[in-house]
Amino acid sequence: MEKYLPKYVPFFTLLALSGLLFLLWNITSLESWNCQTASTFYQLQNSIQSVLKTSEFLLPVEFNYSFCAHLGQEPTAEEAREESYLLKSIAWPEPLVLGLPLRQSSDPAQSYYIIEDPGDLQVGGQLIVKVQMHNFLGQPKKHGGDFLVARLHTPELAAGVAGQVHDHNNGNYTVFFPLLWAGVAQVELTMIHSSEAVMVLRRLRAEQSDRVFFKSLFRSRYLSETTLCNLCLPHKQQPLCNYTDPQTGEPWFCYKPKMLDCDTRINHSKGGYKKHLLTVYESQFFQSGVNIKIPIHSAGVDNVTVQPAKVQTKGMHLEFTPSGYYYQGSWRPLSGVVMRQFNGSSVITQCLRGKMVYMYGDSTVRQWYEYLTSHVPEFKEFNFHSPKNVGPYMAVESNHNILLRYHCHGPPIRFTTVSSAEMHYISNELDGLRGGLDTVVLISIWSHFSTFPVQVYIRRLRHIRRAVIRLLNREPATLVLIRTANLQKLDPESSLFNSDWFSQQLDRVLRAMFKGLNVQLVDAWEMTLAHHHPHQLHPPPEIISNMVNFILSHICPVRRKRRRG
């Protein structure tokens, strides 16, 4: 018998291959197989995936880095003009000569500021500071474009205010500070990035908008695949799944799984950060302790004494009026609402009585939800079995009929894992609200857009603005507050993805696009810049407390006493 076996080998081999092909051909019918067979193939699939795991998210070598500007709904002629205006308004000065060596770039250690002859400084006046930037050779810079921020503060009074930096485009800068309290005030000036570093950030934003990449998991019974996703993907690599939002036209794509359909997507998550984004030359401009967030010191005195107002200063022209300032640790707005302190859960619940508070956006608005639920133990949270720090979240306080809700914004979002069913766009959520005197809407959307061209952010804000206008038209009494961007801690790597320069550009766009509407801005930029705490993406409790007090002060404003005739 054994001598006949060799001649049957080809037959059995062909039979085995035929069986395997038959199984693969019917793999879509996996649901009808028994559990043991399905489990076997599921294990086989996992084995194959584990072999390929190391190369799963390698981006295509021939990736087209140009942004797909044509995607999304076409703007109206007026919106197109607005976009052009916005882009011009945030245009950044360029160095006179590109490709300067490190030694000719801005060196904060050799740069300095001088307080202009202050004379008799009084509350209500202003302080002017002159800045001269030098390079590492000690030579004066001849061009502008350095990203500088400034604050004036008095530690003993827990007082602080942001300054405004004016770039003269010749290496000289002027900083204006309003004088809002009496006492000894200290000038603090920081170079966040040199002009040469900003040029690198501009290149990354234009050419490497995919430097944070995303992924989605697709699953059908025992089969699962993970593919790359983003706002724009080169379609020549492989077929795409199109998840463009039908209401807003906001684009989002994933590569189509090889074995599954597009409608089997179950989640969205951050895939990771691309490495090796800079050349050796460019990396010189991103060194901790050298040219990232380094203080610039005074060539003389670094503080001034401000006297109480002796004469009328109301008519004095101030170059810069901030949205507010800190005094005794409390934020004091300079216009609009009168700031109140809501200390204790009973005061908060009395203010929120009968209110429905909807929070939409990133993790910086989620901090407000967490603050309220932690400071008001009467809030009962619903367990949606949502991933930690992702949501959605909901809490109620039945005694005072209060509802709190938080929902993250739609992609791009760098959260760990978000269910596909929870990928909602803010504008669509706003269209689903009734609105009214009992409705408060809080929005924060900026951090996850820092790697994309500004046009992407403008388009997203345009849809949100349209929805806000529709909401206020049907219910004008609805209260809408929008949070601005804030400064954060930076190092050589995080600067390439989350630089304050990116955030500042988005911040200026947001302020311009919502100017003139019946919405209130929570000025997180100034509230973090003016505070003594080190910058963090998620500001510390002291700042969050001031933000929440500011919000509650709008919900429950001070009632002005009527004058008797």
Image: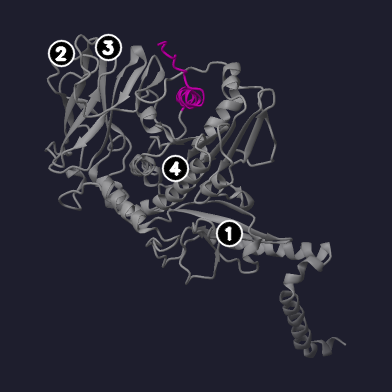
Q: How is the image coloured?
A: one colour
Mark closer to the observer (3, 1): 3
Mark closer to the observer (1, 2): 2
Name the amino acid type tagged 3: Ala
The quadrant in which residue 487 appears is top left
Q: Are marks 4 and 2 in contact (CB under 8 Å)?
A: no
Q: Is residue 216 magenta?
A: no
Q: Which one is earlier in the sequence, the residue at label 4 or at label 2? A: 2
Q: Which mark is residue 447?
A: 4
Q: Is residue 552 magenta?
A: yes
Task: Report which residue position mark 2 lands on.
Answer: 120
Residues in magenta?
Answer: 540-565
| Extreme residue in the right direction | 1
Q: CA distance from mark 3 to mark 2?
A: 12 Å
Task: Report which residue position mark 1 lands on.
Answer: 53
Q: 260 or 420: nearer the eye?
A: 420
The quadrant in which residue 261 appears is bottom right
- The secondary element bearing badge 2 is classed as loop
- The secondary element bearing badge 4 is classed as helix
Q: Which one is earlier in the sequence, the residue at label 1 or at label 4? A: 1
